[in-house]
Amino acid sequence: MLVCFEKREALTLSNQDRPMTFNVCFQKNIDLDEPAFWFVFHKDNILTVLDGEATKPMQIRGNHIASVSPENALHVGVLNGVNCYAVSDDTGQSVNIPNTAWVPLRQSLGRFDEEMFLMYGRARQLLTWVENNRFCGRCGNPMSLKQDERCLVCSACGNISFPRISPAVIVAVEKDGKLLLARSQRFHSKMYSVLAGFVEPGESLEDCVRREIKEEVGIDVDDIRYFKSQPWPFPDSLMVGFTARYAGGEILVDSREIDDAGWFSPDAFPMLPGKISIARALIDHFAEKMTRGDRLSLPPL
Ligand SMILES: [Zn+2]
């Protein structure tokens, strides 16, 4: 029994000081005898190795995980030269490995560093894509992974499905040293954040910024500038961050999506989203700019 546990015990990264290097790549074949990093998901929870307060990816042979087969596992990339595979565990009970725990990916932004969150998020996103495309949307026959490319192909009609990514904009709107923050009906708390919305077909990112802000709070914006982007794997978003400047109108809340909205100065911010989220990065960027006195908005005439 002890030998069995030793064999099943998760290995950890051999050199703790070595930075994580994750390479995005693809291979179809899965070797279950190979020691590899396995990202095992139960819904949006990931099984990770506990290391004090921190968590680490789990290195183990795939054939020690009961829920794994070559058919349901997915190659997601290479971490520090070691292959990374992902698998869904529907029961959440197929692994019994000491010193591991399920960690909710959605609430893990403060627990994982950003690099690890992106890596796990990529795995979760790819699993969701494969699970949602088991059959061809055109003719209904089974889809399977192509040998040399990360896409699913229909064996009957040749229809091809690439991993779906749904772009959304997220925008920090500034007016006279204050930031537009809103409380969404989706939020379970009194948290306020910057506004966000999905890009429509045929719409540029900049047009989406103007439309979303107008629809949700009734104001116009200009001076739209790219900030940075962040993949958001619930289930397949790419958040594209922008800053913008108030250009006219009065706040009129669209009560379908937004409960409340207003202009807030950094010294009076309400409850905010957690660190590492792009929403918080936009808010912190604004607050730092105000601290420096570097105000882009012109005072009212
Ligand atoms: Zn088909």
Image (spheres, helix red, strand yellow):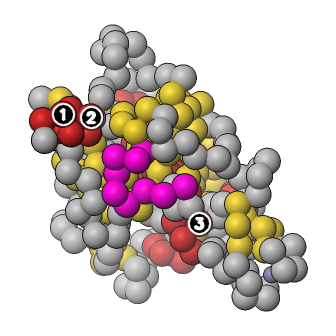
Local SS, label 3: helix
The quarter of the picture where the N terminus appears is top left
Local SS, label 1: helix
Quote the CA–CA distance across marks 1 and 2.
6 Å
Residue 130 tag number: 3
* Mark in the foreground, 1 or 2: 1
Q: Which amino acid is tagged 2?
A: Lys
How far across and how far down the image is residue 160, in percent?
Answer: 80, 68
> Mark 2 and mark 1 in contact (Cβ < 8 Å)?
yes
How far across and how far down the image is residue 199, in percent?
Answer: 64, 67
Residue wearing tag 1: 3
Q: Identify the residue at horizontal 62%, vertical 37% (top origin).
A: 24
Which one is nearer the viewer's eye here, 244 or 105? 105
Q: Left of 81 or right of it: where is 3?
A: left
* Mark in the foreground, 1 or 3: 1
Q: Quadrant of ligand 1?
A: bottom right
The image shows residue 215, relative to residue 265, as above or below, that is below
Whether label 3 lies within 8 Å of ligand 1 gets the answer no
Quote the CA–CA distance across marks 1 and 3.
36 Å
The image shows residue 231, relative to residue 155, as above or below, that is above
Residue wearing tag 2: 7
Quote the CA–CA distance across marks 3 and 2.
30 Å
Q: Which amino acid is tagged 1?
A: Val
How far across and how far down the image is residue 168, in percent?
Answer: 57, 61
> Mark 3 and mark 1 in contact (Cβ < 8 Å)?
no
Which one is nearer the viewer's eye here, 278 or 226? 278
How far across and how far down the image is residue 173, in percent?
Answer: 48, 53
